[in-house]
Image (cartoon, rainbow, N blue to C red):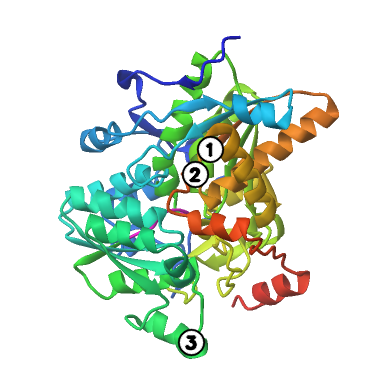
Amino acid sequence: MKKIRKFLLPEAEMPTRWYNIMADMPNKPKPPLHPATKEPIKPEDLAPLFPMGLIEQEVSTQKFIDIPGEVLDLYRTYRPSPVFRAWGLEKALGTSCKIYYKYEGVSYAGSHKANTAIAQAYYNKVEGVKKMSTETGAGQWGSALSFACKQFGIDLEVYMVKVSFNQKPYRKLMMNTYGANAIASPSNLTDAGRKILAANPDSPGSLGIAISEAVERAAKDPEVKYSLGSVLNHVLLHQTIIGEEALLQMEMAGDYPDIVVGCFGGGSNFAGISFPFVRENILKGKKTRAIAIEPASCPKLTRGKFMYDYGDSVGLTPLLAMYTLGHNFVPAKIHAGGLRYHGAGVIVSQLLKDGLIEAQSKYQKDCFNNGVMFARSEGIIPAPEATYAITGAVDEARRCDEAGTPQTILFNLSGHGHLDLGSYEKYFSDDLEDHELSNEEIEKSIAMIS
């Protein structure tokens, strides 16, 4: 086979619809519950936070949803994203497996987050919204939404997890350059932030805390709408353009994956690459394994409990039926900031509960080892989050080689690490730590859920 480096779709063939896996799930997720009444939440209950266009998508069971023209126009500045055959990585591993990766680092933000940022900013613009609030972990989401909001004339406040705010100063500057105001979370600007700081003045922050602050900001000001970069159904919906493209590109390559891998924080990039392939499993009897890779220091899918819990730390969001470590859980200070979230999206949680997807956890040092090997063999320095997907693919290739059953593996390289080189400096200085939760820590955190 000729060693073709890249499989690109012609512009006219870029998918023009998002895929909604809710239409094909054998068991639908349990409904979100109102945080005050504990009754199933109604669409109108979400109106203070989200525009109706996104609320409709959140509760939709329509199989395909057309992508608006203005969104497609901005998508075309970086989509279709390429699929690469990882010849260099295969050689470095000495594997008999075929490894491909879908590279989402070609967007203006350097990650997959642009796919939903553009869509969410558009639907807010349609309803006349002039200001939005959001949270961000490592900063990819905040960067993506900052630029998208600027395109549609919307001001943006970003509550960035404090440990990442300090670890990744250039992400903050990127948001500032695009016109957004980035704030270290927990902050003294919200009741939620002040409550956390009163209890722990040195709190490193978490995505749950940052969500609390951003939600409070929108809930208290009727002129402000809230935006979330992962977890929610409409966010996962927007990301499925990744997998829809990958299906076409793998067909162009004359191949089909036995295994699809994505790193996992709240679910957006894993869902984006995997859901269209899970659909093929459900409807056409394909046998592709879809594997979500999470940190051993934040193992909600592999060691958490499936139950109703808040999506934020203070309890302002609806209660979601999901795998969780407890909304009070504050993860260790790993450099994959986008994966430091206590819970998981309800769709992903239900699919895992039903055995339609799998989950694995990996250690930070192993992931950086594989990230460096990938950079040296493929030329792309991956974001810390993406090293977890690389490690999932590498471990599966080694497993297949040991079993003598070579397979085709596709993983989502969700973003580049050009603004995360400080974490690589820590790696080369042997200054990274591995952290694994004890059963007692997990049980204590879950027991705190009321």
Give, as a three-letter code, the residue at label 2.
Answer: Asn
Distance between mark 1 and mark 3 Cα atoms:
37 Å
Label 3 crowd (10 A; few <14 / some 14-19 / many >=20) = few
Label 1 crowd (10 A; few <14 / some 14-19 / many >=20) = many
Q: Of the residues under marks 3 and 2, which one precedes in the sequence?
A: 3
Where does the C terminus fall, quadrant-wise?
A: bottom right
Q: Mark 1 points at which residue?
A: 412
- Quarter-of-image position of residue 130: bottom left
Q: Taken as a whole, is the magenta stretch helix, strand or loop?
A: loop
| SS of the residue under disc 3 | loop
Q: Of the residues under marks 1 and 3, which one precedes in the sequence?
A: 3
In the rendered structure, does residue 4 fall within the stretch colored magenta? Answer: no
Give, as a three-letter code, the residue at label 3.
Answer: Pro
Whole-percent x, y for residue 214 in the image: 35, 69
Q: Name the residue under label 2.
A: 269
Q: Residue at x 33, y 34 (%)?
A: 78
Label 3 near label 1: C-beta < 8 Å? no
Give, as a three-letter code, the residue at label 1.
Answer: Asn
Q: In this view, does 5 lie above or below 208?
A: above
Q: Can residue 356 be seen in this view?
A: no
Magenta highlight range: 227-231
